[in-house]
Image (cartoon, rainbow, N blue to C red):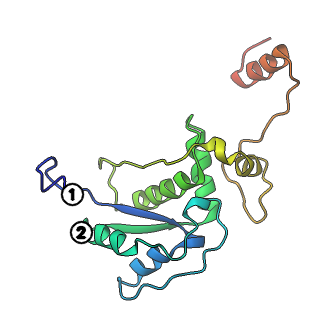
Amino acid sequence: MCKDLELVDRIPRLVCAQAANANPLYLYYKNGWKEFKPVKAETTFASAIQIGDPVSIERAVYALKNSDGIVEEATEEELMNAMARADSTGMFTCPHTGVALTALLKLRERGVIGPRDRTVVVSTAHGLKFTQSKIAYHSKEIDGMECTFANPPVQVKADFGAVMDVLKGYLGQKS
């Protein structure tokens, strides 16, 4: 509609990212849009997108086809690693953003997204909603997951001086 109204001069290429544990659109895309088959969504850290039979599949496919779109997936470990990498920059992202960031990283690694391409990743939630999974990741307590970018929690006494001593140690300053 924005193109029709001449608000933009081109339609951006859309990328849909799904958790591998709930990926019916990804499977549909990979088989050349031949036949959509709902899946039984398995548990995923990205719980809001744990959908095996999306109700608006036709609209999603229409948008993807009309923008030369791509669909990518993220395993649980990939999405948690991407979330941890983003968090290390100062963001505090959700697992859903981890799925989107994984898609970005995969497409960038394959050269689908070029080094100078303008890219937007939509983050829809805040990491504070997912503290338990973040703590489990950084404590390396998730079974079968390496937690490559874990930043282990540090226990500190509830005392200003104790907190400052730990921070100075991390920052390389003398007490």
Q: Which quadrant of the figure has residue 59?
A: bottom left
Whether residue 121 is visible = yes
Residue identifier under label 1: 11
* Left or right of residue 142: residue 50: left
Whether residue 110 is visible = no
Answer few, some or many: residues within 10 Å of disc 2's Cα (few below 14, many 20 plus, some between 14 and 19). Answer: few
Q: Disc 2 marks which amino acid?
A: Asn
Asked whether disc 1 touches disc 2, contact meaning CB atoms under 8 Å apart, the reply is: yes
Q: Which quadrant of the figure has residue 45?
A: bottom right
Answer few, some or many: residues within 10 Å of disc 1's Cα (few below 14, many 20 plus, some between 14 and 19). Answer: few
Q: Position of residue 136 (x, y in %)?
A: 77, 51
Q: Position of residue 142 (x, y in %)?
A: 77, 59
* Left or right of residue 137: residue 13: left
> Mark 1 or mark 2: which comes first in sequence?
1
Give the residue drawn at x 88%, y 24%.
157
109 or 93: nearer the eye? Answer: 93
Find numbered disc 1 in the image and state the secondary structure of the residue it sits on.
loop
Q: Return the mark for residue 40.
A: none
Residue identifier under label 2: 66
Give the residue drawn at x 54%, y 46%.
125
Q: Disc 1 marks which amino acid?
A: Ile
User: Taking 123 as reference, is 22 above or below it?
Assistant: below
Find numbered disc 2 in the image and state the secondary structure of the residue it sits on.
loop
* Left or right of residue 90: residue 169: right
